Image (cartoon, rainbow, N blue to C red):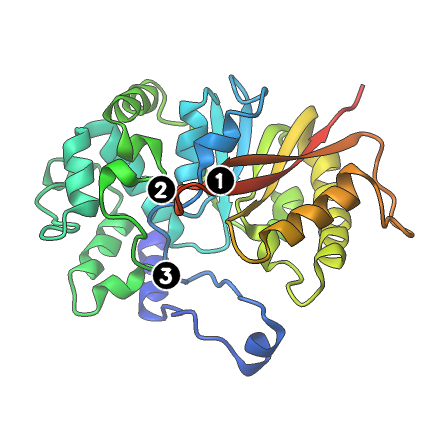
Amino acid sequence: MFDVIKTFYALKTLHRNKHTPTEIKSGARVFKWNNPVYLFSNENISGYLQGLDNMRDGRVLAVGASGDHALESLLMGARHVDTFDINYLQRHVLELKTKMISHLPHADFVEYFLADDQKMNQQIIRPIWRKLSPALRLFLRSIQRPNGMEIFSHSLDWRDANASPVRYVSDAGAYNELQSILRHNSTQVTFHENDLLHVPAVFHEKYDVILLSNIFSYYAPAQMPIGQMKTFYHNILVPLSKLNMGERGTICFNYMWTSPFYNHWKNDFSRLFINREMIDSMTISPHHSFELIEVPSVMKPLVQDCAFVMHQHVR
């Protein structure tokens, strides 16, 4: 009942990404517990996860968001995924996807989310309606009301399932594989309402892989790239590495889409973390190494995106 009440209040007070003058001036995007939700990722998640050698049978901690980091991790062989998100409403996207994938065919999933004439037609999910939590049912009913689509953060950048960056959407075989995984163990993915700064206080496990999507981009955005990276390393990566990473753990701490600033950020990342230039008073642990994993962009043909990655090596 608590989840129903909280969902009702979150929908009633939906924070539609309206920012204060101070937030706008600082360049910060402040996320709330009741923001509109993300439906799908536009990262090439499987592209950079393939570059990691500790996914199979590993424990993963991932940002919640659309749930795609968690689901792609399961496809890469992870045995358990914990997710966190400051936005309480993202839990409903994760539950909806896992229930649909577990019980409905790929064609129904694609039609429900992508068909222009039947987007989120409740008749498609009628066979699993009783399997959904009461809070999720309330969330889904709200979509059918006037302005109900304001619940979603933005429209998809792709409409054709074949063009989706998400493997279980574009590939029916991957969807069926994920369906089999979810059916065999329904406790493989968890959701926690929590922000990044409080992860060490809430999660007490040691993880093989931590996936933060592009959270880094919103951390201290008013700083120049080098300053932003230094701050993020000391305030976020170091505590995570001590409290939440395994001895051979990996953190993917930023995803960068191709942009006019792409090479500038890449160069500063390499100078600071790989070549160890411009350190000044900053100390980088000898147990940490860094790499850039470049992957084909799923948003723009013939260009590269990249993931910023930190590895831990503790004997």
The reply to whether residue 189 is visible in this rendering is no
Q: Which three-letter amino acid code belongs to the residue tagged 2?
A: Leu
Residue 29's disc number: none
Disc 1 marks which residue? 83
Q: Which secondary structure, mark 3?
A: loop
At which x and y percent is residue 262? 58, 51
Q: Which secondary structure, mark 2?
A: helix
Mark 1 crowd level (few <14, some 14–19, many ≥20, 10 Å Cα): many
- Left or right of residue 250: residue 255: left
Q: Which three-letter amino acid code belongs to the residue tagged 1?
A: Thr
Looking at the image, is mark 1 or mark 2 earlier in the sequence? 1
Nearer the observer, 247 or 51: 51
Between marks 1 and 2, how big is the CA–CA gap? 10 Å
Disc 2 marks which residue? 94
- Left or right of residue 250: residue 121: left
Mark 2 crowd level (few <14, some 14–19, many ≥20, 10 Å Cα): many
Nearer the observer, 246 or 22: 22
Disc 3 marks which residue? 36
Between marks 2 and 3, how big is the CA–CA gap? 14 Å
Q: Farthest residue to the front: give it.
A: 302
Looking at the image, is mark 2 or mark 3 earlier in the sequence? 3
Q: Which three-letter amino acid code belongs to the residue tagged 3?
A: Pro
Tell me if residue 189 comes above or below residue 16 in the rendering: above
